[in-house]
């Protein structure tokens, strides 16, 4: 029996699974593969580079996909939104900033508005903006996020949405990498899941093969939320957001010593940039969440979707009263 939820209904998809719009990692090929498997793939618009976006929409080869932006960065180059809307995305996801200035254009273009939130206040803002789908993201998530844990945060957002806007779909994110996570999210009352880290370690992702191998090899203890990677990239993220990355020599040296890192910024920036170019992950960060501990193999995206659904069905059957 397929899972039918507000999410599958609103997006017209077979399975309640979204690909997170991971900057530099979720390209058009991966997004198209997730959509072809019955979920919805979101291209990672990230900080917003027009040429990258055009190339990745081309790589999706006309598949029905969406796109996600880092909202505070989009606000600095709002013209990018029109370029993406011209590609007729099924959905546009906004994270990390006020969605309200962009909401009307997204809805007018016929795309679903997805807002990823990390606090109750942001959930209210998303509902006020007219979001069709609110992603409640817990701190377990890979990449940028905040402090709330997935398990208590998701039902809090569900309660809020049911009270204020019952038609809005609420989706769980952060630490979900298999069918047990999907089953747990559905049991909490969520309409589906958004997965990032699991799809990073897919065949179609644009992640570096060595980074994928590190994800497969690592356990869940080997990540940390830190601002070091933003300091060294000179990205002025709002203070409440940190990034969950895999621990490495760079993070171990500077995490908790950010003032010293700022003092040594010039040389550390050069060293970090060189490490990115060489894919030296002892210095450059692999953005990934606690779910790395659940990932044992790089798989085709289709298989990740199919397995997740089958495992969720089995998990819910196991949990059912006898
Ligand atoms: C490599 C990576 C890059 C990410 N980049 C973005 C991004 O550009 N925009 C965004 O909204 N979220 C981004 N995220 C966070 C995801 O949207 C999502 O919340 C997260 O992946 C969910 O947790 P999980 O990684 O445990 O599945 C990123 C996550 C990862 C792992």
Image (cartoon, rainbow, N blue to C red):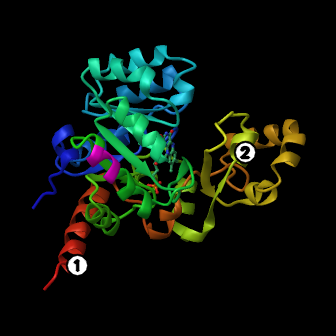
Classify residue 20 by image quadrant: top left
Q: Is residue 253 left or right of residue 106?
A: right
The structure residue drawn at horizontal position 45% and vertical position 56%, both measured from the top left corner, is: 174
- Taking 241 as reference, is 2 above or below it? below
The structure residue drawn at horizontal position 24% and vertical position 22%, both measured from the top left corner, is: 110
Assign the magenta stretch its main secondary structure.
helix
Looking at the picture, tell me which residue is in the foreground, 148 or 212. 148
| Residue at mark 2: C-beta within 8 A of ligand 1 | no
The structure residue drawn at horizontal position 54% and vertical position 55%, both measured from the top left corner, is: 288
Can residue 98 be seen from the camera position used here?
yes
Number of the front mark, 1 or 2: 1
**Disc 1 or 2, which lies upstream in sequence?**
2
- Taking 247 as reference, is 33 above or below it? above
The numbered disc on residue 275 is: 2
How far across and how far down the image is residue 134, in percent?
35, 42
Q: In this view, does 104 lie to the left or right of 73?
A: left
- Taking 204 as reference, is 1 above or below it? below
Stretch of the chain drawn in magenta: 159-163
Between the residue at mark 1 and the residue at mark 2, the CA separation in whole angstroms equals 47 Å
Task: Kindly state the secondary structure of the residue where label 2 is placed.
Answer: helix
The structure residue drawn at horizontal position 24% and vertical position 51%, both measured from the top left corner, is: 16
Can residue 43 be seen from the camera position used here?
no
User: Is residue 137 covered in magenta?
Assistant: no
The numbered disc on residue 68 is: none
Looking at the picture, tell me which residue is in the foreground, 16 or 137. 137
How far across and how far down the image is residue 141, in percent?
50, 55
Residue named by callout 1: 319
Task: Return the residue found at the far left.
Answer: 1
Classify residue 26 by image quadrant: top left
Query: What crowding class fits label 2: few (fewer than 14 Cα within 10 Å), some (14-19), or many (20 or more)?
Result: some
Classify residue 167 by image quadrant: top left
């Amino acid at each position: 029996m397929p899972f039918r939820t507000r999410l599958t209904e609103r997006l017209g998809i077979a399975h309640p699974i979204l690909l997170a719009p991971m900057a530099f990692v979720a390209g058009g090929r991966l997004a198209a593969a997730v959509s072809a498997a019955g979920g919805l793939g979101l291209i990672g618009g990230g900080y917003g580079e027009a040429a990258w976006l055009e190339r990745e929409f081309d790589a999706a080869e006309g598949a029905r996909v969406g796109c996600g932006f880092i909202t505070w960065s989009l606000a600095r180059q709002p013209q990018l939104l029109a370029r993406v809307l011209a590609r007729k995305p099924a959905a546009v996801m906004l994270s990390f900033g006020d969605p309200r200035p962009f909401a009307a254009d997204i809805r007018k273009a016929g795309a679903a508005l997805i807002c990823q939130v990390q606090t109750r206040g942001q959930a209210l803002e998303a509902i006020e903006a007219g979001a069709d789908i609110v992603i409640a993201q817990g701190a377990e998530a890979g990449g940028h996020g905040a402090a709330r844990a997935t398990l208590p945060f998701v039902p809090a957002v569900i309660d809020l949405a049911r009270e204020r806007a019952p038609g809005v779909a609420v989706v769980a994110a952060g630490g979900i990498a298999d069918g047990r996570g999907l089953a747990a999210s559905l049991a909490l009352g969520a309409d589906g899941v958004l997965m990032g880290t699991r799809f990073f370690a897919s065949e179609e992702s644009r992640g570096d093969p060595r980074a994928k191998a590190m994800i497969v090899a690592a356990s869940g203890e080997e990540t940390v939320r830190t601002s070091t990677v933003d300091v060294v990239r000179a990205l002025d993220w709002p203070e409440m957001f940190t990034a969950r990355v895999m621990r490495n020599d760079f993070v171990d040296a500077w995490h908790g010593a950010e003032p010293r890192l700022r003092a040594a910024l010039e040389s550390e920036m050069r060293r970090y940039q060189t490490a990115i170019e060489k894919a030296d992950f002892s210095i450059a960060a692999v953005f990934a969440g606690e779910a790395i501990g659940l990932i044992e193999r790089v798989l085709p995206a289709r298989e990740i979707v199919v397995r997740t659904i089958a495992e969720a069905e089995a998990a819910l059957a196991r949990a059912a009263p006898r």
